[in-house]
Image: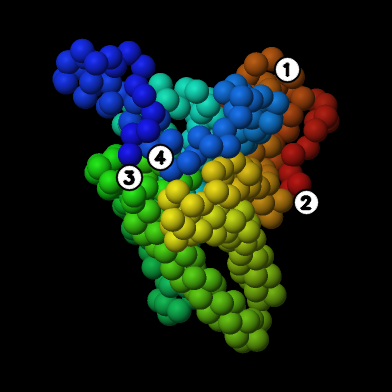
């Protein structure tokens, strides 16, 4: 079970020292037992061109999600409830980008320098982000559905409070699920139960995670099918064309987010299922999830683009934030910008500045 020889453990080594050394090399033992070291190449020890490219993309994902999050918190937090859900998804995308970047930086030979606890934390952050994103999509679907079927309008303040409490609860649950291996649901004491792709993770935990997320996604799809049918039915009854068009546009936006999530994460789910039902030492084709994980991370970069392309309010909020930053760092003069009255951001010292006696150089209203 422990085929490798531990460096420095001679025949006269004390039992306690040998046990401590075995504990230090537990990650190497698991990687060796599951066969993950079989196809390992010398180029895997450094960052390399591909990993460096992925690291740069991760930084871009982090920056764009941070930009959208700040714009929502600054300009749209007090508006419609859907922006609380979008903010939650954005935070999960931001966390996913950070998780992937840390995974790249701590991979290769640095993997074997980690303690088991740090290894579980490195991998667990990604599961936390995945769980939080899935739960946020579920909350959005439930709120959309309840808004369609509930005949009496709920007080906006109480709805926002309830929704934010629900989102916080979802994040707490996501942290618990993502850290379950660190809390004890792992295969440190049972090599035969170990995953090939994630050698310290129990196959039972991976199966639990994939099945749970798949069931939630199926439930979300079912809810949106019902919502679409309700919107279609109500559109025949309502006389307000603007209201109907706005509801359909919001529905299409959320469906695009859900579709991007399924397309980007499905290959990883399928690969993990193959891992679960494959014998540990016979899965010669399952030794890397780099490309499927990169595709999953691409979802975190696509979501902010969807928000910006589909929502005029998000575009205005992001544009306003960028303009204010440019003014504050001195890239342009305050008088060069004009923010139309009623734009989505609450007034700041830099907002709604007019140059007395002259026309504005740039008018920021309705980027359509």
Mark 2–mark 3 distance (CA, rounded to whole Å): 57 Å
Query: Which is nearer the N-term, disc 1 or disc 2?
Result: 1
The residue under the point 70% across, 41% down is 340
> Disc 2 vs disc 4: which is toward the camera?
4
Residue underneath mark 4:
33
Q: Which residue lies furthest to the front in this view?
A: 11
Q: Do the residues labelled 1 and 2 touch (CB within 8 Å)?
A: no
Q: What element carries label 4?
A: helix
Query: Which is nearer the N-term, disc 2 or disc 3?
Result: 3
> Disc 1 vs disc 4: which is toward the camera?
4
Residue underneath mark 3:
191
Image-quadrant location for residue 233: bottom right
Left or right, 138 with respect to 254, comes to: left
The residue under the point 24% across, 16% down is 11
Q: What element carries label 2?
A: loop
Residue underneath mark 1:
331
Residue underneath mark 2:
368
Query: Which is nearer the N-term, disc 1 or disc 3?
Result: 3
How busy is the neighbourhood of tag 4: few (under 14 within 10 Å), some, or many (20 plus)?
many
> Up-down: is 275 above or below 112?
below
Mark 2–mark 4 distance (CA, rounded to whole Å): 57 Å
């Amino acid at each position: 079970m422990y085929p490798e020889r531990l460096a420095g453990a001679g025949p006269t080594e004390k039992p306690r020292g040998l046990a401590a050394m075995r504990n230090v090399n537990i990650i190497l033992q698991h990687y060796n037992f599951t066969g993950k070291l079989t196809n390992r190449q010398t180029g895997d020890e450094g960052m390399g061109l591909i990993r460096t490219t992925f690291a740069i993309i991760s930084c871009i994902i982090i920056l764009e999600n941070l930009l959208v999050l700040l714009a929502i918190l600054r300009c749209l937090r007090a508006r419609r409830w859907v922006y609380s859900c979008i903010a939650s998804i954005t935070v999960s995308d931001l966390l996913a980008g950070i998780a992937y970047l840390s995974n790249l930086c701590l991979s290769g030979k640095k993997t074997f320098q980690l303690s088991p606890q740090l290894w579980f934390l490195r991998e667990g952050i990604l599961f936390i982000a995945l769980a939080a994103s899935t739960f946020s999509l579920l909350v959005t679907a439930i709120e959309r559905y309840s808004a369609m079927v509930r005949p009496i309008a709920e007080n906006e303040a109480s709805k926002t409070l309830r929704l934010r409490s629900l989102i916080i609860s979802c994040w707490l649950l996501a942290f618990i699920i993502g850290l379950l291996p660190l809390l004890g649901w792992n295969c440190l004491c049972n090599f035969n139960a170990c995953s090939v792709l994630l050698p310290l993770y129990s196959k039972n935990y991976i199966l639990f995670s994939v099945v749970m997320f798949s069931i939630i996604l199926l439930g979300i799809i079912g809810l949106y099918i019902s919502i679409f049918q309700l919107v279609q039915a109500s559109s025949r009854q309502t006389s307000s064309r603007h209201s109907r068009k706005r509801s359909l546009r919001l529905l299409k936006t959320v469906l695009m987010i859900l579709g991007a999530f399924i397309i980007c994460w499905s290959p990883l789910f399928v690969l993990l299922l193959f891992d679960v039902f494959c014998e540990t030492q016979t899965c010669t084709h399952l030794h890397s999830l780099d490309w499927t994980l990169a595709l999953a991370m691409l979802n975190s970069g696509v979501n902010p683009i969807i928000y910006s392309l589909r929502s005029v309010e998000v575009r205005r909020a992001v544009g306003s934030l960028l303009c204010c930053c440019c003014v504050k760092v001195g890239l342009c003069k305050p008088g060069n910008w004009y923010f139309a009255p009623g734009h989505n951001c609450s007034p700041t010292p830099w907002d709604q500045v007019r140059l007395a006696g002259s026309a504005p150089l740039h008018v920021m209203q309705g980027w359509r």
